[in-house]
Amino acid sequence: MFWLLFGIFLAACMAVGATGGLFPPGAWYRQLNKPSWTPPDWVFPVTWTTLYVLMAAAGARVALSPDNALAMALWALQIAMNGLWTPVFFGLQRIKLGMIVLSLLWLSVAATLWALWQVDWIAGLMFVPYLIWVSIAAALNWSVWRLNPKAANEKRAVSS
Amino acid sequence: MFWLLFGIFLAACMAVGATGGLFPPGAWYRQLNKPSWTPPDWVFPVTWTTLYVLMAAAGARVALSPDNALAMALWALQIAMNGLWTPVFFGLQRIKLGMIVLSLLWLSVAATLWALWQVDWIAGLMFVPYLIWVSIAAALNWSVWRLNPKAANEKRAVSS
């Protein structure tokens, strides 16, 4: 049962992760000013893949535990929030709205970590790298906003 | 506790629903050939809002029930799949890929309905309108594909 649950939670992560392939960082992202500590592009999918495995394992552990209501509701919330950022940032090229989405994602991940920990501290621990990574992503989104005031105020003309 | 859980699951639905406002049906969608039974635009947000309330209530009921592991994992999977369709269809204007996403969404909603029902038949019942609506959406996506063979083979040039 653990592995079936792990597979379902991993599929949820992969559905959200598909946005990274559908809305890849293109010429628009490359021409933005970025802080010196910006990780190279390849780091993102590698890191996310690792995080997805941890997130799915945490979900499966807590799904099998009693009194998991809050943790399960928050796990669903954070995965829904997670899927929003890439289409907003890379698809719509909206830097400020991306910052809002990332802030809400950070809060939902922090809340999920806390709720998982109440049920099973190992599952909570599995969310720590995720919270750290979302913190780094938020710092990067923030820096990109500050370093590109003009691009941050542009709304991309959606071709239609 | 029910209402807190209801609020969290509803927030997850609303995060996904935000894609409808971010990637609205524009000129591209209007100029496509659509079947005669296509619902007017206003029907979509009204229907989805109703479905979100039912989905959140079903989630909260089952979160509070024992032996909810499979249902909770599948609830998370279907919400992650749900958030993919609008960015793919309206954002990327990819009709065939939208059909694939909708098919996977349909499967995940059907599986969630079944799993919810095992735990609490009322929660399962609350997913029935959702499955019907996704079936209608899939029929619409399919018809749009068939009626617009040229548009279905075009990949939108993402401005960058």
Image: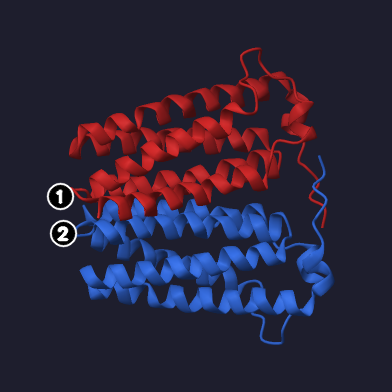
Chain colours: A red, B blue
- Picture quadrant where residue A126 is located: top left
Q: Residue A143: x, y in percent?
A: 63, 20
Residue occupying the point 76% across, 27% down = A30
Q: Is residue B117 above or below residue A132?
A: below
Question: Under tag 1, what secondary structure?
Answer: loop
Near mark 1 (Cα within 10 A), the count class, few <14, some 14-19 or many ≥20, is some
Kind of residue at disc 1: Pro
Q: Which mark is residue A79?
A: none
Residue occupying the point 71% across, 19% down = A147
Query: Dot 2 corresponds to which residue?
Result: B66
Q: Residue A96: x, y in percent?
A: 64, 33
Q: Do pointers 1 and 2 mark residues of a single chain?
A: no
The chain holding disc 1 is A
The quadrant the C terminus of chain B occupies is top right
Kind of residue at disc 2: Pro
Q: Is residue A131 above or below residue A90?
A: above
Query: Dot 1 corresponds to which residue?
Result: A66
- Picture quadrant where residue A41 is located: top right
Assess whether mark 2 and mark 1 are in contact (beta carbons under 8 angstroms): yes
Instruction: Judge from the rendering whether residue A83 lies leftward or rightward of residue A159; answer left or right.
Output: left
Residue occupying the point 20% across, 37% down = A120
Instruction: State the residue in front, B79 or B15.
Output: B79
Instruction: State the residue in front, A58 or A102.
Output: A58
